[in-house]
Amino acid sequence: MTAPYRVSRRIEIDAGHRIMTHGSKCRHIHGHRYGIEVVCEAVDLHHDGEQTDMVVDFGFLKDEMMRAIDHPCDHGFIAALADRELLAMFAPQGVEADAWIAGLETTVRAEGEATTHNTRLGTKLTVVPFQPTAECLARHWYIKMFQPVRNRSGGTARLVKVTVFETPNCSAEYGE
Ligand SMILES: Nc1nc2c(c(=O)[nH]1)N=C([C@H](O)[C@H](O)COP(=O)(O)OP(=O)(O)OP(=O)(O)O)CN2
């Protein structure tokens, strides 16, 4: 059945990254003010309760986006697990870098990402199992947000897509 109702919610975060495989400037360490937009759809609106006549409360969407996206990544660095040389730069002083990276890898394999402040400068680091392109971040955040959207809307809303703006002019989206 087609779903006639759609709602969207946008947040913005600041984060650093690099694309180690990129042919030119994006292989350098740099940052973005990412814009992230989620779109949800519903066949019908809630008929009662606190979400009456809504697809899903915008506030609930914000809560879940903060949990899934802002808390692990805002004012942090998003690094590919494959970027070993870069990860070694984050290893805490006096800790064997390979062992420290192996610990992160275990968490990434089990949970899809690893966030830590236990780094050389105490800065926030999130490690992901892909190159942190806008496309892969969109898919990653889609997967993280899918079930929370279902749950917070009591099954009424379905996450349609996540769009990630790297700059005001460039975006990638992932949806199923
Ligand atoms: N398909 C993709 N292409 C690129 C990605 C990406 O995630 N997906 N990422 C980058 C870089 O991270 C880069 O920071 C952005 O590149 P670019 O748009 O070339 O940067 P500009 O500063 O020129 O962007 P403006 O909007 O003109 O300021 C590269 N490509």
Image (cartoon, grey):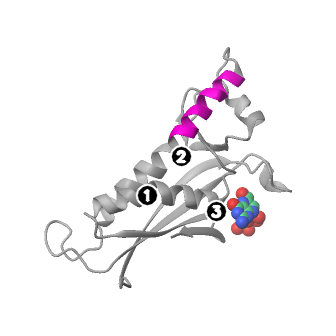
Residue type at numbered disc 1: Met
Q: Quadrant of ligand 1?
A: bottom right
Where residue 97 appears, as percent x and y from the top left, is 70, 23
Q: CA distance from mark 3 to mark 1?
A: 15 Å
Near-viewer residue (132 or 98): 98
Q: What residue is disc 3 on?
A: 135
- Give the vertical position of 125 relative to 7 (above or below): above
* Cβ atoms at labels 2 and 3 below 8 Å apart: no
Q: Which residues are magenta?
A: 98-110
Circle 1 sits in a helix, a strand or a loop, which is it? helix
SS under mark 2:
helix
Q: Residue at x 63, y 69 (%)?
A: 171
Position of the N terminus by quadrant: bottom left
Asked if disc 2 and disc 1 are in contact, CB closer than 8 Å, the reply is no
According to the picture, the residue beneath numbered tag 2 turns out to be: 73
Circle 1 sits on which residue?
Answer: 145
